[in-house]
Image (spheres, rainbow, N blue to C red):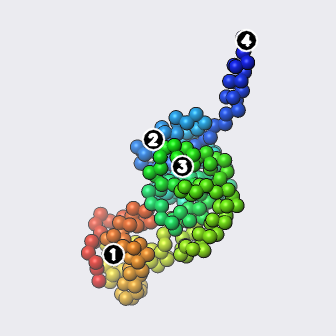
């Protein structure tokens, strides 16, 4: 079979084109499939798998070794930050881009601290997500609209850590701006327990519980317990253990 010069150039171009392999992780099937379908239209991208939980994501990352994993922050069993931390600890080659509906500044910093190479909102436009993936695949770090080289990112991270409040959460745990005791109190509040019940359960005074609840409301910038519960639930910081949560402020 005869090949023209154009045929040879075309064949050479196809050989030189490098595919970026991608794993899409989200527990909402419609959103997950939508992202996968959008990325499938990009010639240089290849979606090699999908997962609906943190555990499944880690298993596929270990077996498929994709270059990029798009991971939802709030996942069942193991959240996106924990997945990121495990990938970094295992020194796997996959770079993680976290997707979130809540881009609180401290949560962004915590994601970067955990080892994420990218962090962006779920309402990002498809063409913008393509650019983020390309930048991260090229070795850069993308936080929102900012693109950093390794040295630029280290400088940015140091500056952000100096300005941020103390981060209580470890890199491999869900981010929340609360101390361990405040998280215990919040978990009790989510279960609908009164301050007196919380005091008995945790072995602390009634006044101490009130002080912790006040601190939680202040850190979340909300006015009452119900708003605090909703705020924490939507961000995946706590789980709803009971079907009923008391809505009134309890003494």
The residue at which mark 4 appears reads as: 2
Going from N to C along the chain, the mark reached first, 1 or 4, is 4
User: Badge 3 is on which residue?
Assistant: 70
Distance (Cα) linking label 3 and label 1: 34 Å
| Vertical position of residue 93 compared to residue 174: above or below | above
Secondary-structure class at tag 4: loop
Question: Residue 14 occupies which quadrant of the picture?
Answer: top right
Viewer-side label of 3, 1: 1
Query: Upstream in the sequence, badge 3 or badge 4?
Result: 4
Left/right placement of residue 96 relative to residue 251 reads right
Residue linked to disc 1:
223
> Which disc is residue 33 wearing?
2
Label 3 – label 4 distance at C-alpha: 43 Å
Q: Are marks 1 and 4 in contact (CB under 8 Å)?
A: no
Looking at the image, residue 129 lies above or below residue 145: above
Q: Residues within 10 Å of mark 1 (few under 14, many from 20)?
A: few
Q: Residue shown at 46%/45% (left/top)?
A: 32
The tag earlier along the polypeptide, 3 or 1, is 3
Q: Is residue 48 above or below residue 159?
A: above
Q: Which mark is residue 66?
A: none
Q: CA distance from mark 2 to mark 4?
A: 42 Å
Task: Give coordinates of residue 83: x percent, y percent.
Answer: 56, 56
Q: Residue at x 42, y 80 (%)?
A: 215
Query: Do residues under tags 2 and 4 come within 8 Å of each other at their CB atoms?
Result: no
User: Mark 3–mark 2 contact, CB under 8 Å?
Assistant: no
């Amino acid at each position: 079979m005869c090949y023209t010069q154009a045929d040879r150039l075309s064949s050479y171009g196809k050989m030189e084109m490098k595919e970026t392999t991608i794993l899409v992780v989200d527990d909402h099937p419609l959103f997950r499939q939508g992202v996968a379908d959008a990325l499938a239209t990009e010639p240089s991208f290849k979606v090699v798998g999908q997962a609906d939980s943190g555990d499944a994501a880690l298993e596929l990352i270990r077996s498929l070794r994709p270059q990029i994993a798009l991971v939802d922050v709030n996942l069942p069993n193991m959240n996106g930050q924990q997945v990121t931390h495990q990938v970094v600890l295992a020194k796997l080659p996959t770079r993680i881009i976290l997707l979130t509906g809540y881009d609180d500044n401290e949560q962004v910093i915590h994601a970067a601290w955990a080892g994420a190479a990218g962090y962006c909102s779920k309402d990002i436009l498809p063409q913008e997500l393509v650019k983020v993936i390309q930048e991260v695949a090229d070795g850069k770090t993308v936080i929102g609209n900012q693109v950093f080289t390794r040295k630029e990112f280290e400088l940015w991270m140091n500056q952000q850590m100096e300005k941020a409040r103390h981060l209580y959460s470890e890199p491999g745990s869900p981010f929340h701006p609360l101390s361990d005791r405040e998280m215990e109190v919040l978990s009790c509040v989510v279960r609908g327990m009164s301050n007196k019940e919380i005091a008995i359960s945790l072995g602390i005074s009634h006044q101490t519980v009130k002080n912790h609840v006040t601190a939680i409301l202040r850190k979340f910038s909300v006015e009452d317990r119900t708003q605090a519960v909703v705020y924490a639930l939507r961000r995946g910081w706590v789980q709803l253990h009971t079907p009923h949560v008391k809505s009134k402020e309890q003494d």
